[in-house]
């Protein structure tokens, strides 16, 4: 039975309230909650069992926070919902509750996580943005943590490629972190999906970020590392990915760049090399095939024309700001002549617009 509140069934509303109660029990944690739910079969019965053991805590009443969260347009999913992402069940400590804003269908789509340093170089950010665009164009969802540096660049690239991106937050929805990413947050919430396991007003505390990395790894079929230092949080995501049996690819970096020491170390330990962004679909053929199928399923929906594979790198190099042919050729790693020919094709397809001085912008 559907329609209780905010698209939740009446049963899901009861489960959300039960999980709010379980989350309030000191020391229980996600693993403990999962154990109780596995044992008793639902959040409501798990809470009743906890109360019987004297671990009392009352979830908010009808005039508590739940109605206001739904009124703000937040989606909620308890881990017992049939709509809960199956990939998160691979975790030993899945989030009991997911707060969602945006395109919830992206939770079930083929996905790749792109992670790396907050103090990324310009080249690293450009690589992450190109990867994000190419994957999104191919129907593959880009998952990252909306942090400065590589994360933000990957999300921006995915938004440029159609919006197939999921941001997993280290705070609640009412606390945008970092504050400089407010516009990026709005863009992802509008075109992609924002996910958090934290209550809406919870702050961005330091221990939240390593914790959220397990969700990033679980939601993706593969993890790509771009510029990670030896103490980078991206390496925590890699550890989770390996534990979950996910593929790990690394973009090699300069030995002189301290922000690449961790990612280069992964290569020495046997991680797969991603030699350049344009090779990503060839390196992940199964995810690429699933992305193509998802894109074909949406073919009847209004949207931009299909971009030929040989032009995707050039299109990814375009932006709303005018760029010269030479700059675009450099970004796309093609000759000036190839860039001119490709830009002409993109212009004819309505995907690029020429500006004075032989400069081009994305349409």
Image (spheres, grey):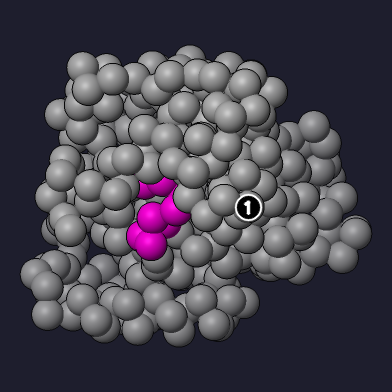
Q: Nearer the viewer, residue 5 or 209?
A: 5
Is residue 279 in view from this perspective? yes
Q: In this view, does 207 lie above or below 6?
A: above
Residue 336 falls left or right of residue 251: left
Task: Report the label total.
Answer: 1
Secondary structure of residue under mark 1? helix
Question: In which quarter of the view is residue 182 placed?
Answer: top left
Dominant secondary structure (helix, strand or loop) of the stretch shown in magenta: loop
Q: Nearer the viewer, residue 208 or 188?
A: 208
Q: Which residue is drawn at 52% across and 30% down?
A: 22
Whole-percent x, y for residue 254 in the image: 77, 47
Whole-percent x, y for residue 204 in the image: 52, 19
The quarter of the rendered structure image containing the C terminus is bottom left
Where does the magenta region start and end? 76-84
Q: Is residue 166 above or below residue 59?
A: below
Q: Is residue 93 magenta?
A: no
Q: Residue at x 44, y 41 (%)?
A: 44
Q: Is residue 79 magenta?
A: yes
Q: Residue at x 15, y 29 (%)?
A: 71
Whole-percent x, y for residue 270 in the image: 87, 65
Q: Nearer the viewer, residue 265 or 58?
A: 58
* Mark 1, other Cα within 10 Å: few <14 / some 14–19 / many ≥20: few
Q: Residue at x 56, y 70 (%)?
A: 280
Is residue 331 in view from this perspective? no
Whole-percent x, y for residue 38 in the image: 61, 54
The quarter of the rendered structure image containing the N terminus is bottom left
Q: Is residue 325 above or below residue 95?
A: below
Residue 148 falls left or right of residue 264: left
Residue of label 1: 39
Q: Which of 44 and 102 is in front in this view?
A: 44
């Amino acid at each position: 039975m559907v329609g209780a509140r905010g698209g939740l069934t009446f049963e899901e509303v009861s489960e959300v309230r039960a999980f709010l109660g379980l989350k309030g029990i000191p020391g229980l944690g996600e693993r403990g909650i999962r154990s109780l739910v596995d044992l008793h079969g639902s959040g409501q019965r798990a809470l009743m069992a906890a109360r019987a053991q004297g671990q009392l805590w009352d979830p908010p009443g009808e005039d508590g926070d739940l109605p206001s969260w739904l009124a703000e347009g937040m989606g909620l999913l308890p881990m017992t919902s049939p709509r809960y992402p199956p990939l998160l069940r691979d975790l030993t400590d899945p989030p009991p509750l997911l707060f969602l804003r945006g395109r919830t269908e992206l939770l079930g789509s083929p996905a790749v996580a792109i992670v790396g340093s907050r103090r990324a170089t310009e080249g690293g950010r450009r690589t992450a943005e190109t990867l994000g665009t190419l994957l999104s164009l191919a129907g593959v969802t880009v998952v990252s943590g909306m942090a400065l540096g590589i994360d933000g660049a990957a999300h921006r690239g995915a938004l440029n490629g159609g919006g197939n991106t999921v941001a997993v937050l280290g705070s609640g929805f009412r606390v945008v972190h970092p504050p400089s990413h407010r516009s990026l947050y709005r863009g992802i919430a509008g075109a992609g999906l924002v996910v958090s396991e934290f209550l809406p007003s919870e702050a961005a505390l330091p221990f939240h970020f390593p914790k959220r990395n397990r969700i990033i790894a679980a939601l993706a079929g593969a993890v790509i590392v771009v510029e990670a230092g030896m103490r980078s949080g991206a390496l925590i995501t890699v550890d989770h990915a390996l534990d979950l049996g996910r593929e790990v690819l690394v973009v090699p970096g300069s030995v002189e760049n301290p922000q690449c020491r961790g990612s280069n170390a992964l290569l020495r330990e046997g991680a797969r090399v991603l030699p350049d962004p344009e090779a990503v679909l060839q390196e992940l053929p199964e995810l690429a095939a699933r992305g193509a199928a998802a894109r074909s399923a949406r073919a009847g929906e209004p949207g931009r024309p299909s971009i030929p594979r040989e032009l995707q790198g050039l299109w990814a190099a375009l932006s709303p700001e005018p760029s010269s042919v030479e700059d675009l050729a450099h970004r796309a790693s093609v000759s000036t002549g190839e860039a001119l020919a490709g830009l002409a094709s993109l212009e004819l397809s309505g995907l690029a617009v020429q500006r004075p001085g032989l400069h081009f912008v994305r349409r």
